[in-house]
Amino acid sequence: MKLTHLPALAALGFLGLVAVAPGCRDNLDDTVTGKCPSQAVFEQSVSPFLERRCGTLDCHGSIARPMRLFGQLGLRHPDEDNVSGGALTTAVELTANYTSVCNVDAEKMSESVDDFGNQAENLLLVTKARGLEKHKGGKVVSENDAGDRCLRGWLKGEDVTQACQDAVDQLQ
Amino acid sequence: MRSPLLGFAGGVLLAVALLSCRYDPVPQEVIDSLGPEVGSASDTHRPGEPCVLCHGSYGGVSPQMVIGGTAFTTDDDGNIIGADAVEVTVFDSSGGSRKACTNSAGNFYLEKDEWKEIAFPLTVRAGSRRMRSLIGRDGSCGSCHKIPDPDFPERDPDTGAAHDSAGYILVDPADQGACP
């Protein structure tokens, strides 16, 4: 390397530092609260479907898997003393399931809520369930079947009581 | 002078690379935790353990299984024992089903070649008892139906049930003998 290049390199390095430095100034304690559709509807209607179809101990009821789901017949919450197959799904577990599902795709989920669910079909929750995105569990719902209406309806703020119940019934 | 050494080093590197292609730490850790074989391997060995880990594509052990597990029951004194000659029916999502019979240890399995087009999730009936949840993807019943183990004190010492375990697959004693 020629010595005459040193000033230019130093200038480049300085510019790089100036460009990167603002990125380090963010307060790491800052939090952003994401938006997610109705927790009450989720806990009443959507969670029972997800618990049964997706929350088995060998799928999303595994502690090793993202979008962890708790439930009566799957994984039990570690803060409580229940065993798989024992007591009904608890309030703590329903809240944990809601948090888990809302945070799979947190930013897009917020955008979807702001857009009244019109972007719901782009969420991983939907694309993975439909098998459009790589999903180890394969295709879980088909477009407009009961399970699909249960998920999309919740994301759009619709009444999904019947769709989710139908989806659960089909799995009995 | 360098050629033989280079050849040897290349061979070692190739061997390591090939071995690492087969190594998957997730199933391997579970396999290692099961401990060494006691006695000789047979169709009554290791009741309650997750069969398909070894008898699947990763483990490579014959016979290759698509489903494998152990059904238990209670004897007259209330002790947990392997359930003999119990009919186990597995139903898949495409409407297909297969039957298996437990042996004297309670072990049962379906070979991969018997059901190449199996579609998960599955449901199962063991004897007169129907499984309440679905099987999402794991053909090893023992992965979720863990049995009591002093090394895992979080499991119920009588049933094996825990946060992440449904415990023994328990069938009615009267269900025994239904299979030839």
Image (cartoon, coloured by chain):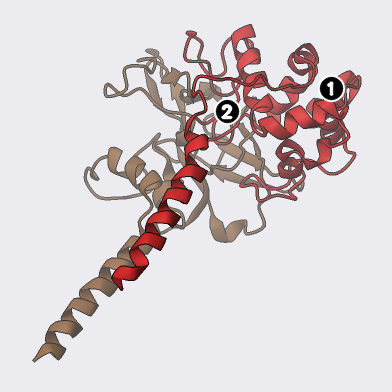
Which corner quadrant holds the C terminus of chain A?
A: top right
Which residue lies at the image location 56% right of the left edge and 40% below the top edge?
Answer: B179
The residue carrying pointer 2 sits among few (fewer than 14), some (14 to 19) or many (20 or more) residues within 10 Å by Cα, namely many
Q: Chain of mark 1?
A: A
Which corner quadrant holds the N terminus of chain A?
A: bottom left
Tell me: residue B17, above or below residue B62: below
Residue A55 seen anywhere in this rendered image of the structure: yes
Q: Cα distance, mark 1 to mark 2?
A: 22 Å
Residue at which label 2 appears: A68
Rendered location of residue B121, percent (x, y): 67, 41
Residue at which label 1 appears: A165
Callouts 1 and 2 close, C-beta under 8 Å: no
Residue B45 seen anywhere in this rendered image of the structure: no
Which residue lies at the image location 31% right of the left edge and 17% below the top edge?
Answer: B153
Q: Of residues A44 and A154, which is closer to you in this image? A: A154
Which residue lies at the image location 74% right of the left edge and 21% below the top edge?
Answer: A35
Q: Is B149 displayed left or right of A88 in the figure?
A: left
Q: Is A22 displayed left or right of B11 in the figure?
A: right
Q: Chain of mark 2?
A: A
Rendered location of residue A171, percent (x, y): 76, 31
Q: Is B49 displayed left or right of B97 in the figure?
A: left
Looking at the rendered structure, the number of numbered marks drawn on it comes to 2
Give the colour in which the image draws chain A.
red
Give the colour in which the image draws chain B.
brown
Q: Earlier in the sequence, mark 1 or mark 2?
A: 2
Mark 2 is on which residue type?
A: Arg
Q: Of residues A155 and A13, which is closer to you in this image? A: A13
Q: Where residue B94 is drawn, which disc sits there?
A: none
Mark 1 is on which residue type?
A: Gln
Q: Under tag 2, what secondary structure?
A: loop
Which residue lies at the image location 57% right of the left edge and 18% below the top edge?
Answer: A85
